[in-house]
Image: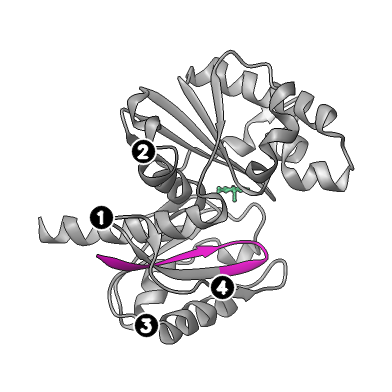
Amino acid sequence: MVQLGIDIGGSATKGALVDTSTGRLASERIRFQTEPLVKPKEVLVAIQEIQRILDYQGRIGIGYPGIIKNGSILTAANMNKKWIGENLAKKVEELTCQKAVVLNDADAAGLAEMRFGFEEARKYHTVLFLTIGTGIGSAIFVNGKLMPNTELGHLQIRGRDAEHRASDLVRKKEKLSWRKWAARFNEVLQTYTFLFNPDLIIIGGGISYRFDHFKEYLNTNTRVVPAKLQNLAGMIGAAMAAHEADLEVLG
Ligand code: BGC
C-alpha cells in the first residue's frame, strides 16, 4: 500500500510516497524550504503542492513538532504560535479533498524506526526513541505500543527544558565539544531512565548521523543505539499512521 507521508519541521516541509509494507520511499522526496516560524498557511500550500506534484489520492499522514489531539495542534515550542489551536487534519482535508491524519513528529519517526529501522527493538519491553535536532522529541513504546505526545524534550533539567540544554542546535550554537555535549545529554538520559526505565534507547534526528562521535561518552546502563532511517523516519511514520487510520475505518 502506498501512502503520502509529510514531515513538517521548523525549516522545511518534506513529503514522499511510502510503501507502507516495506517502509521504502515509492517516489522522490519533495522538500519545501520554509522560513523559521513559518505560518500554517504557507505550510498548507506546501502540502497541497506535494500532493499535486506526486499526483496522490488517498489518506495523507502528517507529522508535526508538537502535541496533537484529534488532528488539532496544542503546542508550538519551536514553531510560530499561530499553529496553536489549528485543526491541521481538517484544514488539509478541506484543501486537498483527501482524508488526513496528524501525529507528533517524534511519534511518527519512532513508529517507523520500530517497524523498519532498528527492527530488533520490537523484542524489548520498553523502548525510548529520541530525536535530537532543533529540539528533543520523544516516543515511548511499551510492548510495541506507542504512548503518544510524551514531549520529554520539555522536562526540566537544571531549571531548563532538556532541549534547551542538550539539543543538536544547542550543541552547534554553543560550539560544544562532543564530550561537553555528551555530559549534558547524559544528564538528560539519566532523568529519562530514572522515570521510565527503558530497556532500549534509540537515538534519531540529525545527531544520529554522528553517533560515532559521542557514543564513547555515554554513561547510561541502558543499551543505546542509533536510528537507521535517519531523516526519512518522520515521513515513513506519517505514511504508516495514514495506513493504520485507513485500516481502522475498514474495521
Ligand atoms: C516539540 C516536540 C517535537 C520535538 C522534535 C519539540 O520542541 O515540542 O513535539 O517532537 O521538538 O521536533
- Tell whether position 248 is magenta: no
Give the Cα separation between the discs numbered 3 and 2: 28 Å
Give the Cα separation between the discs numbered 1 and 2: 13 Å
Percent across and percent down for residue 10 are 65, 62
Picture quadrant where residue 178 is located: top right
Disc 2 marks a residue whose amino acid type is Leu
Contact flag, marks 4 and 3 (Cβ < 8 Å): no
Q: Is residue 4 left or right of residue 227?
A: left
For the N terminus, the image quarter is bottom left
Q: In this view, does 229 lie to the left or right of 77?
A: left
- Magenta span: predominant SS is strand
What residue did someone put label 4 on? Answer: 40
Q: Is mark 2 on a helix, strand or loop?
A: strand
Q: What element carries label 4?
A: helix
What residue did someone put label 1 on? Answer: 244
Task: Judge by depth and name the residue closer to the eye, 181 or 63.
Answer: 181
The outermost residue toward the left is 251
User: Which circle, 4 or 3, is nearer the viewer?
Assistant: 3
Upstream in the sequence, badge 3 or badge 1? Answer: 3
Residue range highlighted in magenta: 1-13
Picture quadrant where residue 207 is located: top right
What residue did someone put label 3 on? Answer: 96
Give the Cα separation between the discs numbered 1 and 4: 25 Å
User: Which circle, 2 or 4, is nearer the viewer?
Assistant: 2
What residue did someone put label 2 on? Answer: 146
Give the Cα separation between the discs numbered 3 and 1: 20 Å
